[in-house]
Amino acid sequence: MTRLRPIPDDQMTPEVRTEWESLARWRKPQADGQIGGPFDTWLRSPEMSNQMRRFGGFLWERTSLDRGIVEFAIGVASVYWQSNYEWNAHGPRAVEYGIPQAVADELLAGKKPTTDRNDINVAYDVCQALLEGKALSTALYDRAIAEFGERGLVELCGTIGFYTQVAFTLRAFDVEPTEGQPRPFAPPPEA
């Protein structure tokens, strides 16, 4: 993390301390006390951090969608937003949870994956449409409902929205993978 440093112990409010301790039970802190990912940034707003982790926990553990599709959707968002940290955390997990390596490779290369798996094709088309700021056509909506149901489509939208927020947090605070980890995307231009 280049823009934020660890919050010194003597500067942690009780709310920040409680949230940090909760995070530290779930993710092992680094030697400098940092948690990693978007979590160190979210600590600056401990209530937001708690709410984001609760929603993220739902997406990680209790969604009705296949875990591979969730990880694939996160991958689509990370490629769209060129988020190295997010891709490194979730691109390999998509493969681990059943998304073909060739699909992940095409996605990372910025291509629409070629696959005969309808769930992957529908998820990609929905994610891309939403990320590009478009409405779902009736045909795409119908495909999504047929594949995932109403609940699944709601959860797919939530996944894309949540991981867009994660990508924005990572970008705003210049959170990149540690030295030696892949960085498939060049830094974005500054505003």
Image (cartoon, grey):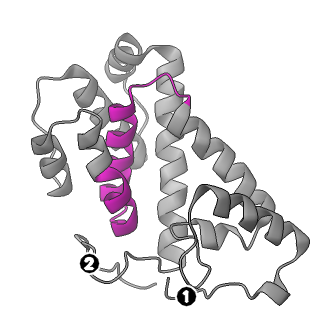
Label 1, secondary structure: give it. loop
* Residue 3 numbered mark, or none: 1
Which quadrant of the view contains residue 70?
Answer: top left
What residue appears at the point 23 percent right and 42 percent down from the top-left corner?
95
- The type of residue carrying mark 1 is Arg
Label 2, secondary structure: give it. loop
* Marks 2/1: CA–CA distance: 18 Å
Q: Where in the figure is residue 110, as x and y percent of width and height?
A: 18, 55
Circle 1 Cα neighbour tier, 10 Å, few/some/many (<14 / 14–19 / ≥20) = few
Of callouts 2 and 1, the N-terminal one? 1
Q: Main secondary structure of the magenta part?
A: helix
Q: Can residue 9 be seen in the rendering of this structure?
A: yes
Left or right of residue 159, residue 21 in this image: right
**Could you tell me how many numbered marks the image carries?**
2
User: Looking at this view, is 55 or 6 the one in front?
Assistant: 6
Q: Specify start and end residues of the magenta stretch as a single range.
A: 62-91
Q: Would you place residue 178 above or below residue 18 in this image? A: below
Q: Would you place residue 105 above or below residue 96 in this image? A: below
The question of residue 86 being in magenta is answered with yes
